[in-house]
Amino acid sequence: MPASHELKPLDTVSRAAATTTESGVVSACKSTRYPDACEAALASLATRAGAKGPKEMFHVSVEFAKSRTLLARDMAYNLTLSSAQTSTSRSPSGVHDCLELLDITSDQLNDVLQPKEGGSSHDARTWLSAALTNQATCSESLQAVKAEGGDSLSARVRSLSQHISNSLALQGKVQDDDGVGGGRKLLSDGFPAWLSAADRRLLEASPDEIRADAVVAKDGSGTHATINDAIAFVSLASSGGGRKVIYVKAGTYDEFINVPTKQKNVMLMGDGKGKSVIVGSRNVNDGWTTYNSATVAAMGAGFIAKGLTIINNSGPNKNQAVALRVGADKSVVHQCSIQGYQDTLYTHSNRQFYTETDIYGTIDFIFGNSAVVLQNCYIQPRKPGGTQKNSVTAQGRTDPNQNTGISIQKCRIQGSSDLGSSTPTYLGRPWQKYSRTVVMQSYLDGSIDAAGWDKWSGSFALSTLYYGEYENTGPGASKSGRVRWAGVHTALSSDEASKFTVSEFIVGDYWLPDTGVSYTAGL
């Protein structure tokens, strides 16, 4: 007689399935930095129908982070309403920064959950890395410029950071089957592959060869008198999409420029370095947050700047004073001059590329937590105030799973003529625990201290940072006096250095050709 195949009660089956799911969640969450928060976020997975593998866990984790983002954003919004009624300050509080950054985070998590056709796992990792950076910036702003209720918002943002961090860790478990990260070849014109043919022509063209959507002129010969008016105009005309070119005629513009995250594909084209000049003077000493001190802020994806000089003229004694802040994904800055002192260039987040651009500053003057490559740029440490030390970079990677860092390739780092030998100048120092910076195939003059790299404070981050050097030349490139921290690699192999090239680090072959800028894909 055949054996009996007695069916188990449905509740027994569901309990077994739930137990299996719970076991899988616990196992997956062990790979995250905050396993308790991870398990709480994935608790709803057991009640969902269908598969419950790594992809589903990742999706639920991001959904949970999105829900917490909306709660934090609502809190920030209510706090800004309250502060508007009581504040007499002309500069916004840290809460205002948080509201903007939480709005951006919400959009980024939406993009992760609903990727567009042709999207990749590298996109998802980039946007999650940027979303996590937003929370760190929010926390910094709340600390710098206090506001009523800021402590409660800070606690909520810290919790949100844990969930985004966990999503990053879980994303690493999802199979990458889209092929991104391979080395598509450099195009014959030397531009990265994510630039369209139209954008390549724009970057190669002079202003009189283009048809601009708006023209800014101080003498009234353009369509607008201010750059911000032109940005508002193209924003209305494009509803946030399509390449929009704003030609900024020669002149000095005393404006604080903002290209918001909703306004994508804006190109600001000037008449050249030293001709089309944008000047500002916001700084931390005068009550601004570092984030909001920028003379020009560009957050809309696809941003391009060409032929501009951007200055923060606060001077060497006003602490953080940003000239240019960029958080625009797939952004390009070409043939520009960026001038300031402390915190000149804020490469805030997402994928960025700088070429043939001059950058001047003192303390931490190239900083942020984007994935950025600077290629064929002139970088000048200048004389700081008092007894200050110079640091070219201060990279802000807070999580080991973020795909961020600063890559300086084929550049010239040369101190100003008045810098002198009494001012120590370093390639970088670790702003955050997992700071990552590589300098390769560049000329380093004698202003660079023999130690190469500087401490932030005591032993902070010395065992977790990643600093690399590869095939540099010049008197500042000598390795004999370099610091010997665990994370410093003074002789990278070509394979290791290749990871920080345009092709590998910012996956530039997939988006730079659309912008039209020349670049070197590999070493």
Image (cartoon, helix red, strand yellow):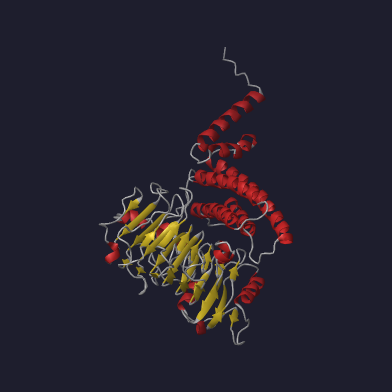
Q: Residue at x 57, y 79 (%)?
A: 253
Q: Depth check: give the residue in front, 235 or 135.
A: 135
Report if residue 502 is visible in the image: no
Q: Depth check: give the residue in front, 224 or 464.
A: 464
Q: Quadrant of the C terminus?
A: bottom left
Residue 307 appears left or right of 443:
right
Q: Position of residue 74 (x, y in %)?
A: 69, 52
Q: Depth check: give the residue in front, 471 or 23.
A: 471
199, above or below 104, in the image: below
Q: Position of residue 472 (x, y in %)?
A: 30, 63
Corner quadrant of residue 448: bottom left
Residue 488 appears left or right of 261:
left
Q: Depth check: give the residue in front, 3 or 258.
A: 258
- Residue furthest left as drawn: 480
Q: Residue at x 58, y 71 (%)?
A: 257
254, above or below 171, in the image: below
Corner quadrant of residue 517: bottom left
